[in-house]
Amino acid sequence: MSEQSTPQATPAAASAAEPVVEPGSPLPHELAAALKRDSAGLVAAIIQQFDTDEVLMLGWMDDEALHRTLTTGRVTFFSRSRQEYWRKGDTSGHVQFVKSVALDCDGDALLVRVDQVGAACHTGTRTCFDDRSLGAVTGERD
């Protein structure tokens, strides 16, 4: 997308009684107040295939990207490297159609369930986690 904007930084220490709301946030006040953003004003967005529960990727959203995601049916991210908004699939054709969006219990992560068309990863793989296992020792319940 050609539209560019830089998210506003959020004070690191916010009082529990006074949640931080981004100035001019397009989100409903209660949602904006519930978000715990990083120092760049961003929240992690975990993207998951809605019908298989496959974790596809992680992206970043500010208030505007989340607003666009909630109101258009397509996932929009904020690119930390390019400092601009990008809607998944506009150049690649690998579209993410929104099925649901949830905020975690701490307010610092989003779970966006989507119907993914094609590859989710910029490398061309289905997920950003394909063939990237770290070989961890697995645990068992007692």
Image (tube, helix red, strand yellow):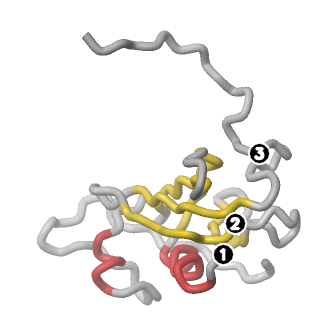
Judging by the rendered image, the residue that carries numbered circle 2 is 96
Q: Earlier in the sequence, mark 1 or mark 3?
A: 1
Amino acid at dot 3: Arg
Q: Earlier in the sequence, mark 1 or mark 2?
A: 1
Amino acid at dot 2: Gln
Measured Cα–Cα span from mark 2 to mark 3:
12 Å
Residue at the extreme left of the image, as rendered: 17
Q: Is residue 82 left or right of residue 41?
A: right
Q: Are marks 1 and 2 in contact (CB under 8 Å)?
A: yes
Judging by the rendered image, the residue that carries numbered circle 1 is 74
Q: Determine the secondary structure under disc 3.
A: loop
Q: Looking at the figure, which quarter contains the N terminus?
A: bottom right
Which residue is pictured at 70% across the width and 57% down the height?
81
- In the image, residue 118 sits, relative to residue 20, either above or below, namely above
Residue 46 lies, in percent from the top left, at: 53, 53
- In the image, residue 41 sits, relative to residue 57, either above or below, namely below
Which residue is pictured at 35% across the width and 57% down the height?
104
Judging by the rendered image, the residue that carries numbered circle 3 is 126
Q: Determine the secondary structure under disc 2.
A: strand
Measured Cα–Cα span from mark 1 to mark 3:
18 Å
Residue 114 lies, in percent from the top left, at: 61, 63
- In the image, residue 21 sits, relative to residue 137, either above or below, namely below
Q: Earlier in the sequence, mark 2 or mark 3?
A: 2
Residue 49 lies, in percent from the top left, at: 61, 54
